[in-house]
Image: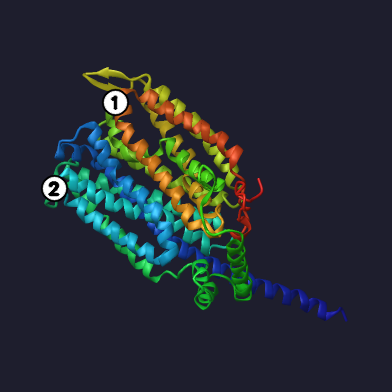
């Protein structure tokens, strides 16, 4: 006899573990689907904010706009974004995450139709503002929702879906722009009975409908439900996202966190550092620096930019589309590494890469010469500018692009998460507005100086991450509460 019981025990353990692992994978798969559905808001975010890229010159001609006026027309959506982001957190705390997602989809839908049929500058700006409200709202709700339904082991990866969806939206917008412009011959020419630039906006109706339907079928965040005292509803949702034997533990952990924070302090972002809690300022600066490196200049103005330094219109559209493909591809790097390497090392590496590449772009543009009254990059400088502009996109897309949204979704304590995320997102959109509206004027003055400024902010972001951003990898949202004094993020560096 060779102890048959011992032989049966390993088989039993293996069988149990296999079942547990299978169940765990099934729940992670389900949560992943929820995260993907929520991230469709990010797709609309990327699409609606970048669709203007291929239409800038046509809109300037249609409405007779100056450089400053065209800059405002492009940036007008960003004003709506800032307001949408600022109020989205409060609305989400009052009405719920999924209901606010649905209304964001409605705003997208209305804006797409209105922008496509705009008859004057003022109403075009109005429809873009309305679309901006939807974009800003989605920019807050998606990362908040994803972080609140995701297991901590894969939270960073799932939260990165927001940025992946944004990059896919940007790619879809630029590909759509290229399709209509090439089909018509130019963005101003007619196709299917309307100028091509109008179709660029109208196609946004399709993803807005998809997002609205998904918002209706998504389960509500269990954390939101518990804050409203809807424990039975929270339990129903939790059974869909965690294994059965961990439902009670998960609910108790969330409830304990909510009660602890309620006892410590009312859910307010106000504090003793210039009126806000320190952690809120960290989020604001993080969000502002993400934009001040000038990334959206690439996605809002790249077609115009490459034309300005000597590339043909068709080539400029192609270059912009290729850049957006690069942006999508490198986001997978962040998804793969964020829960393995961590947030902080990736951000530091990204800042270094952005600084070097932006500096080289600035140097390349300093070699510009005038040919027949138009600027052009001689010799190999055009290729150098293209290479380092895309290396900038790589550095940003693999790090700062997704990780800012990951951190904003997880760095704040539960009691202020939605509100603080809204403030951080609003700051991001205000910074985006500043960069977008100043670029036409700065670029007409000197592209070298313009990209030199962006390079300087990339350098600042490097030191900011080292000094102020702690590591949040592998910690539950409840573990990352801050002290009453609000020192940093309450996580280990």
Residue indicated by mark 1: 444
Residue 42 visible in image: no
Question: Could you classify mark 1 by the number of other residues whose Cα lies within 10 Å: few (under 14), some (14-19), or many (20 or more)?
Answer: few
Q: Quadrant of the N terminus?
A: bottom right
* Residue occupying the point 33% across, 27% down: 442
Residue indicated by mark 2: 119
Q: CA distance from mark 2 to mark 1?
A: 28 Å
Q: Helix or strand or loop: what does disc 2 sit on? A: loop
- Looking at the rendered structure, the number of numbered marks drawn on it comes to 2
In the rendered image, residue 371, in percent from the top left (x then y), is placed at 25, 18
- Residue occupying the far left of the picture: 193
In the rendered image, residue 389, in percent from the top left (x then y), is placed at 41, 33
* Residue occupying the point 40% across, 57% down: 88
Q: Does residue 386 appear left or right of residue 332 in this picture? A: left
Q: Does residue 62 appear left or right of residue 125 in this picture? A: left
Front position in the image: 423 or 190 = 423
* Residue occupying the point 35% across, 49% down: 81
């Amino acid at each position: 006899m060779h102890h048959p019981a011992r032989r049966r025990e390993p088989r039993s353990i293996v069988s149990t573990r296999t079942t547990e692992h299978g169940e765990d994978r099934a729940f992670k798969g389900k949560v992943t689907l929820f995260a993907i559905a929520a991230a469709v808001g990010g797709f609309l975010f990327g699409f609606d904010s970048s669709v203007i890229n291929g239409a800038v010159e046509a809109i300037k001609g249609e409405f007779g706009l100056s450089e400053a006026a065209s800059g405002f027309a492009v940036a007008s959506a960003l004003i709506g974004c800032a307001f949408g982001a600022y109020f989205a957190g409060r609305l989400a705390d009052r009405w719920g995450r999924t209901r606010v997602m649905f209304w964001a989809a409605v705003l997208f839908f209305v804006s797409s139709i209105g922008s496509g049929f705009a008859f004057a500058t003022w109403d075009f700006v109005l429809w873009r503002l309305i679309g901006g409200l939807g974009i800003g709202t989605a920019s807050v709700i998606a990362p908040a929702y994803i972080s609140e339904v995701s297991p901590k082991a894969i939270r960073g990866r799932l939260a990165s879906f927001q940025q992946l969806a944004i990059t896919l939206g940007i790619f879809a917008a630029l590909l759509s722009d290229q399709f209509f412009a090439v089909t018509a011959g130019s963005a101003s020419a007619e196709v299917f009975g309307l100028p091509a630039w109008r179709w660029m906006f109208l196609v946004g109706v399709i993803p807005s409908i998809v997002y609205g339907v998904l918002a209706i079928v998504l389960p509500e965040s269990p954390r939101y439900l518990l804050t409203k005292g809807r424990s039975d509803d929270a339990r129903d949702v939790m059974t869909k996202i965690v294994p059965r034997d961990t439902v009670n533990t998960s609910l108790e952990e969330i409830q304990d966190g909510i009660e602890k924070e309620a006892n410590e302090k009312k859910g307010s972002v106000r504090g003793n550092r210039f009126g806000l809690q320190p952690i809120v300022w960290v989020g604001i600066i993080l969000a502002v620096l993400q934009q001040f490196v000038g990334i959206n200049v690439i996605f809002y103005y790249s077609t115009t930019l490459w034309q300005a330094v000597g590339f043909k219109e068709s080539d400029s559209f192609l270059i912009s589309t290729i850049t957006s493909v690069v942006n999508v591809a490198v986001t997978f790097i962040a998804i793969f590494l964020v829960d393995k390497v961590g947030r902080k090392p990736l951000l530091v590496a990204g800042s270094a890469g952005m600084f070097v590449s932006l500096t080289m772009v600035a140097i390349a543009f300093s070699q510009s010469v005038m040919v027949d009254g138009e600027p052009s990059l001689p010799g190999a400088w055009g290729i150098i500018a293209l290479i380092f502009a895309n290396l900038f996109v790589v550095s940003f897309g693999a790090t700062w692009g997704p990780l800012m949204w990951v951190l904003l979704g997880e760095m704040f304590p539960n009691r202020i998460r939605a509100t603080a995320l809204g403030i951080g997102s609003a700051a991001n959109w205000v910074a985006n507005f500043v960069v977008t509206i100043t670029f036409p004027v700065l670029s007409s003055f000197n592209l070298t100086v313009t990209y030199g400024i962006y390079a300087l902010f990339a350098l600042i972001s490097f030191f900011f991450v080292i000094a102020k951003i702690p590591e949040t990898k592998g910690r539950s949202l409840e573990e990352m509460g801050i002290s009453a004094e609000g020192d940093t993020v309450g996580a280990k560096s």
